[in-house]
Amino acid sequence: MENIVEMTQARINMYGLLSRLFIEEIDPFTLNKLKENEDLLELFPNTKEWKDFWEKDAIKLVEEDLNVDFTTIFILNVYPYESVFVNDEGHINPTITNPTLVFYREHGYSIDLNKTRALSPDHIGVELEFMMNLAQEELNAIARENHEEANRVREIQRKFLEEHLANWGLPYLLAVKDIAETPFYYDLADATLEFLMSDLEYLYELQETKQ
């Protein structure tokens, strides 16, 4: 039980971090926090070897390198929306018929896009936040020793990854890696890809154990 609690908390933290880094540009404060955290730096192996990451002033690094790369990737070239990658038209779908939004509503999750920079509920940052919230619900159920509820929420997580985030996320994150000009965003895409695949496998393993 203790291992599951620790694992679930770690998953919450990871989904929260990834959501933050995809939804908007990194700021100097967050950048410095990353530099000070050895565990987080393990997710960014190429960034650790990037000379400017350590030697360049944090504000200049953000403004001259990281923000420029963020704009090039997420605003100009590789739009971070599921609807862009799964529809032949390649357009963002912000309507109430968006399958991701339908999934959210079916599971009691609402989103206020005015509080984010996302144009549609199927932004990768919003989907990552959805998974974070589900994992938090799972942790709450574990704390109440409600194993049936914990298993129910895990099944929602598995289904969402399988049908949405880990599905379209594969070609999307590969595209980000291909276009990224800084080690930071290359590493971010690579770490996210690896995490989503491993998390889906983890949820399947828990499901098999339950059976």
Image (spheres, grey):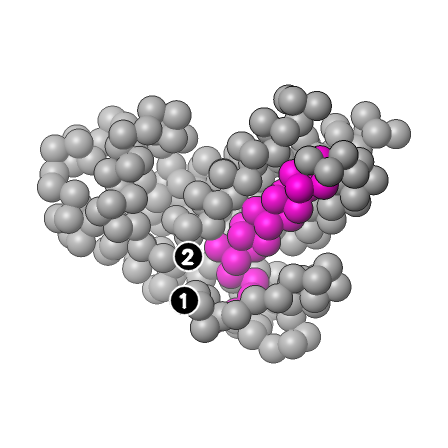
**At 32% across and 29% down in the image, what residue appears?**
37
Asked if the magenta segment contains residue 39, the reply would be no
Mark number, residue 20: none
Q: Nearer the viewer, residue 108 or 69?
A: 108
Seen at 31% across and 55% down, the residue is 25
Q: Pick the residue in front: 60 or 136.
A: 136
Instruction: Return the x and y of residue 61 as percentages of the image width and height.
Output: 17, 45
Which quadrant holds residue 188?
top left
Query: Which of the two residues, 114 or 86, is positioned nearer the viewer here?
Result: 114
At label 1, which amino acid type do we have?
A: Arg
Q: Which residue is mark 2?
A: 23
**Res. 117 mark:** 1
Q: Secondary structure at mark 1?
A: loop
Relative placement, left or right, of 104 versus 36 is right
**Magenta-tinted stretch:** 119-142
Q: How many marks?
A: 2
Query: Gap in Å between the C-alphas at discs 1 and 2?
Result: 7 Å
Inspect the magenta stretch and tell me whether residue 129 lies in it.
Answer: yes
> In which quadrant of the rendered image does the N terminus lie?
top right
Residue 202: tell me if it is visible: yes
Say what amino acid the circle numbered 2 marks: Ile
Location of residue 111 (image quadrant) = bottom right
**Is the residue under label 2 in contact with that under label 1 (CB below 8 Å)?**
yes
- Would residue 167 be visible to someone looking at this image? no
Residue at the image position 74 percent from the left and 46 percent from the top? 153
Q: Residues within 10 Å of mark 2 (few under 14, many from 20)?
A: some
